[in-house]
Image (cartoon, grey):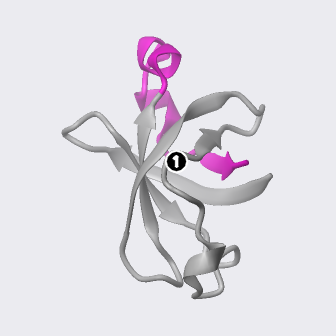
Amino acid sequence: MKRLGQILHISKQNELVVRGDRKEFSGSMKDLPRINSFALDRSIKPIGKISGIFGPVDQPYFTLKPDKRVIASGLEKLVNERVYVQ
């Protein structure tokens, strides 16, 4: 399991915006996780899937399409939490 980054906020499209961890990405595209990879919380529960990658390669940003169970429990609780990718 690899650390993806920290959730910054919820977009108007109801997606989670994550700032990627600088330590995990060496500036190479091959180090980035793939679109549709599952994002997990620290208790290894799925939060959603990566739906987009943007920004600089050495510290990218990701958008996550949240899982329906996460939407039901409230997205606001996830802001500032660290997320991981499998």
At x 60% / y 42%, what residue is drawn?
A: 39
Left or right of 45 on screen, residue 59: left
Residue 80 is situated, as x and y percent measured from the top left of the image, at: 52, 47
Between 79 and 67, which is closer to the camera in this rendering?
A: 67
Residue 81 is situated, as x and y percent measured from the top left of the image, at: 59, 44
Between 71 and 27, which is closer to the camera in this rendering?
A: 27
Q: Looking at the image, which residue sits at the far left?
A: 12
Residue 10 is situated, as x and y percent measured from the top left of the image, at: 33, 41
Q: Looking at the image, which residue sits at the far bottom?
A: 27
Range of magenta residues: 67-86
Left or right of 14 on screen, residue 41: right
Between 59 and 33, which is closer to the camera in this rendering?
A: 33
Residue 61 sits inside the magenta stretch: no
| Residue corresponding to mark 1 | 80
Q: Is residue 3 above or below residue 22?
A: above
At x 74% / y 39%, what residue is drawn?
A: 42
SS state under label 1: loop
Residue 59 is situated, as x and y percent measured from the top left of the image, at: 51, 78
How many numbered dots are placed on residues in this image?
1
Q: Is residue 40 above or below residue 74?
A: below
Between 77 and 49, which is closer to the camera in this rendering?
A: 49
At x 43% / y 11%, what residue is drawn?
A: 72
At x 55% / y 55%, what residue is drawn?
A: 6
Residue 85 sits inside the magenta stretch: yes
Q: Residues within 10 Å of mark 1 (few under 14, many from 20)?
A: some
Task: Say which amino acid is labelled 1.
Answer: Asn
